[in-house]
Image: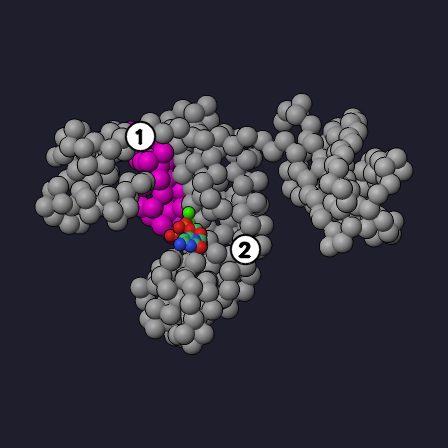
């Protein structure tokens, strides 16, 4: 069993959360419309704006034409990434066996977690509640026997949906859906298939009339998969994330420098940023690695390991500065680049 989770109107919903006066009125996140003369596209919009026909990828000038009175906001990617990280932290609490598809979307492997669809539904419901409690955001969840069914199910009751499709119901569930719901069927494939069947607006069940041979002739290897997909089958695997092994940051000076104050303050700043990133992993670190590149491009790394400890900026800076000073004392040349990296402890079991 597979669970697919997708945040509702993600960028726009985050903006609504940050500023409740954007709620209930059309809100568009994307390029600046510049009173209709703007270039660029809509990233996304809330459901009120969708009523005007506005959608992701649409030219922002067209969106403005459709609804000039909407609120238009620029893309604040830093904010959405931060929220996304928080959401994936919550997903991780439910299961480590998940695939991150994008900032707002994941598949979770339910094998070993749920023995039947009732238990699976419970997990989906709890996960939605947890995300809402912690982040005040809604998402839609779909559960099915494979990735494709789970994904189509999560679209079913959007926004704030929870749809479970039992194995026996999958074939019927997808029959009347547009073939565009099958992952990988875009406008081009849709057109080719329309030509074979001599009609447009194809439903998934329509494709069951095409032989495997004909699908392969027209679509190549992908045709074989589509032959299975329209019959409710999907053998694609959940691409499990591998745990982050290390986190680091480096910086190249605008000009090579020998100024100890500049080197130390830059190093302090790097340590702080690495500590900030490492903290979100909520795991201890066991090694600090320092890298230094000199004006002649010779690059040296030094590292120190210790008993696993929390990645505080004090610890990272103290361990790193000691390595750096030793290195600089030996090879004194103008510094071009500084880097610091922390390696997580792999032995931790929750
Ligand atoms: N996105 C984008 N440009 C696109 C499509 C998406 O910038 N052409 C961004 C903005 C979306 C986010 O990715 O908020 C997630 O995309 P989705 O396709 O999941 O769409 P939404 O989450 O916005 O809406 P829905 O409620 O339909 O999932
Ligand atoms: Ca989404
Ligand atoms: Ca998505």
Residue at 57% across, 45% down: 86
Between 51 and 326, the residue placed more toward the observer is 326
User: In this orientation, does residue 78 appear?
Assistant: yes
Mark 1: which secondary structure? loop
Rendered image coloring scheme: one colour
The residue indicated by pointer 2 is 77
- Left or right: 99, with 270 as reference point: left
Residue 29 position within the rendered picture, expressed as x and y whole percent measured from the top left: 46, 62
Q: Nearer the viewer, residue 103 or 187?
A: 187
Q: Position of residue 213 (x, y in %)?
A: 16, 28
Q: Is residue 245 above or below residue 194?
A: above
In the rendered image, which quarter contains the N terminus?
A: top left
Residue 108 occupies which quadrant of the picture?
top left
Q: Which residues are magenta?
A: 139-167
Q: Is residue 54 left or right of residue 243?
A: left
Which residue is the site of mark 1? 234
CB of mark 1 near ligand 3 (< 8 Å): no
Sooner in the amino-acid sequence: mark 1 or mark 2: 2
| Quadrant of res 175 | top left
């Amino acid at each position: 069993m597979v669970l697919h989770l997708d945040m509702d109107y993600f960028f726009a919903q985050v903006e609504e959360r940050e500023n409740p006066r954007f709620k209930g009125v059309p809100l568009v996140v994307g390029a600046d419309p510049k009173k209709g003369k703007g270039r660029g596209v809509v990233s996304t919009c809330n459901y009120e704006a969708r009523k005007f026909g506005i959608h992701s990828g649409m030219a922002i000038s067209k969106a403005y034409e459709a609804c000039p009175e909407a609120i238009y906001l620029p893309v604040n990617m830093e904010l959405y990434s931060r929220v996304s990280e928080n959401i994936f932290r919550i997903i991780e609490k439910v299961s480590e066996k998940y695939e991150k598809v994008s900032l707002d979307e994941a598949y979770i492997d339910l094998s070993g977690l749920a023995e039947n669809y009732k238990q699976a539904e419970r997990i989906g419901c709890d996960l939605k509640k947890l995300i809402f409690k912690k982040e005040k955001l809604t998402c839609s969840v779909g559960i099915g026997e494979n990735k494709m069914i789970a994904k189509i199910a999560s679209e079913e009751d959007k926004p704030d949906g929870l749809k479970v499709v039992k194995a026996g119901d999958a074939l019927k569930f997808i029959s009347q859906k547009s073939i565009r719901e099958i992952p990988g069927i875009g406008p081009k494939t849709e057109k080719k298939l329309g030509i074979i069947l001599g009609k447009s607006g194809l439903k998934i069940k329509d494709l069951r009339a095409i032989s495997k041979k004909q699908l392969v002739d027209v679509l190549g290897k992908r045709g074989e998969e589509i032959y299975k997909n329209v019959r409710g089958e999907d053998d694609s695997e959940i691409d499990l994330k591998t745990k982050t092994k290390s986190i680091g940051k480096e910086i190249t000076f605008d000009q090579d420098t020998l100024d100890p104050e500049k080197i130390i303050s830059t190093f302090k700043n790097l340590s702080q940023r690495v500590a900030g990133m490492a903290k979100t992993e909520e795991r201890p670190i066991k090694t600090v690695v320092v890298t230094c590149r000199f004006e002649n491009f010779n690059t040296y790394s030094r590292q120190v390991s210790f008993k696993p400890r929390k990645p505080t900026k004090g610890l990272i800076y103290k361990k790193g500065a000691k390595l750096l000073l030793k290195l600089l004392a030996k090879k004194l040349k103008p510094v071009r680049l500084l880097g610091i990296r922390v390696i997580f402890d792999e032995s931790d079991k929750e």
